[in-house]
Amino acid sequence: MSFNRASAKSTLHLFLLCFKLFKVHLKRTKKPKLIYTKYNTIPFKVNTAQRMSCPVRGFCSWSSSCFVLVVVVFLVVFPKLFELCVLCLFFRPTLLREQHYQYLKKGLRHLSDAYECLDASRPWLCFWILHSLELLEEPIPSAVASDVCQFLARCQSPTGGFAGGPGQHAHLAPTYAAVNALCIIGTDEAYNVINREKLLDFLWSVKQPDGSFVMHIGGEVDVRSAYCAASVASLTNILTPKLFEGTTSWILRCQNWEGGLSGVPGLEAHGGYTFCGTAALVILGNEHMLDLKALLRWVISRQMRFEGGFQGRCNKLVDGCYSFWQAGLLPLLHRALYNEGESALSRQRWMFEQQALQEYILLCCQNPTGGLLDKPGKSRDFYHTCYCLSGLSIAQHFGNMDHHHELILGKEENRLAPTHPVYNICPEKVAQALQHFHRLPVPEVNRQPGASGEDRPSDAAAASSSANLQP
């Protein structure tokens, strides 16, 4: 059972029961006198004779001892838990829309020197901020949208694909981020930035003979690269069967005994890699080849019973970003199982505790001054802001355009726009991009899998971009 309003009420009932027992004890004592316990926090009325006969000073009966114990546990050991109980019972969870909007709007124009380490992640910053704004249903000014388009055009490599910044090497992760950001803007200027012929050439240059993809020429192989390649290829209408020949079988080898998928075959199942592999197979139309029941069992076991949020791997802590990487899997599995003829599927809910996830995000992951975070005590950032909001959107919306059901925790103002569970941009932006690019012919590129003949990047800029799709 997750920690929700019901469990919060039970917890406070225990606290109040001990308090009532203590009050009963006070009525039975004579000549009460105020003293402090050894914790020096709360004065208690106790009888002097009882105090002298008590083995521990200030602990005079079972009832008062029980009350003091509960006070100590809540106020000393679990102060955050007690605070959360009060929040759940007496305050309606509220999305701090205006604070988040101001935080995101400022980030589009100015970043502090703390973001210097993300110099090879600048298209990611554009995507994280723009997607967060579209989920909040905040309009993007045309001047800002045009500036983003011009900046991303400078990040586009002459050999195809996008780099983490102007003058850097092309990399699949910022390519995914740049294409998504341009699709969010959704103007002709944005679409025209993408050089589809060169992009296809870049995808061939990072394709490997076994069906996998490297993140950049000379870079590492993992399932993120297959997802990034499939995502940008499908959105821009350059996906061909030959380009992804062998990719399905390689991804299937990444599903291990746990049920989830690992970064490469033979490793531990991980939430982000599982999403990337599953979403890539959905794009390729082969998700039915996974062991869907084992995958479902693994992902629903990642929702934490107490916090309500998701962990990324077995025996790890909850993290706000997995609100999307893990919860985003459930719509994909729902669709796959429905296509397999599963009759027990709900017509109103995904197969996870949607309300508990919303409670975790709204109560534990919001910075009061704007932005969202991993967990209480952590700093806010644009990455967690994007994926916490994406997970919140998944938890609020069930179904598709034909059959839609909403489950909004708290006020109606908490409602976010829906997000597409495969591409993680709003569904209407996906439809608009597909409509635009499907009017264009698929470019013809006669290439074989493997790196191009150009110099392979040796600097750290290209490699650092691989950390930006942080599953």
Image: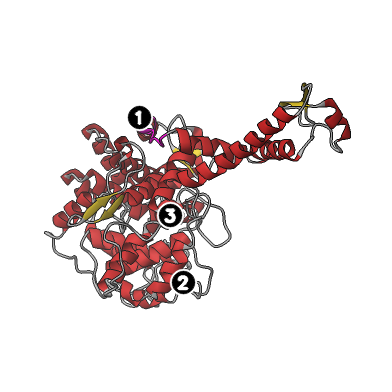
C-alpha distance separating marks 2 and 3: 22 Å
Q: Tally the numbered discs.
A: 3
Residue 262 seen by the camera: yes
Which image quadrant for residue 36?
Answer: top right
Quick one: label 3 or label 1, which is nearer the N terminus? 1
- Binning the other alpha carbons within 10 Å of mark 3 as few (below 14), some (14 to 19) or many (20 upward) gives many
Horizontal relation, residue 75 to residue 340: left or right: right
Residue occupied by mark 3: 469
Horizontal relation, residue 58 to residue 257: left or right: right
Q: Which residues are magenta?
A: 92-100
Which image quadrant for residue 399?
Answer: bottom left
**Cβ atoms under marks 2 and 3 closer than 8 Å:** no
Report helix, strand or loop for mark 3. loop
Residue depicted at 45% across the width and 58% down the height: 457
Residue 453 seen by the camera: no
Colour scheme of the rendered structure? secondary structure
- Residue nearest the viewer, comparing 184 with 394: 394
Query: x, y (%) of residue 27?
Result: 70, 28
Query: x, y (%) of residue 421?
Result: 31, 57
- Given the image, on which type of amino acid does mark 3 rest? Leu
Horizontal relation, residue 37 to residue 74: left or right: right
C-alpha distance separating marks 2 and 1: 40 Å
- Given the image, on which type of amino acid does mark 1 rest? Glu
| Residue 259, label in figure | 2
C-alpha distance separating marks 3 and 1: 27 Å
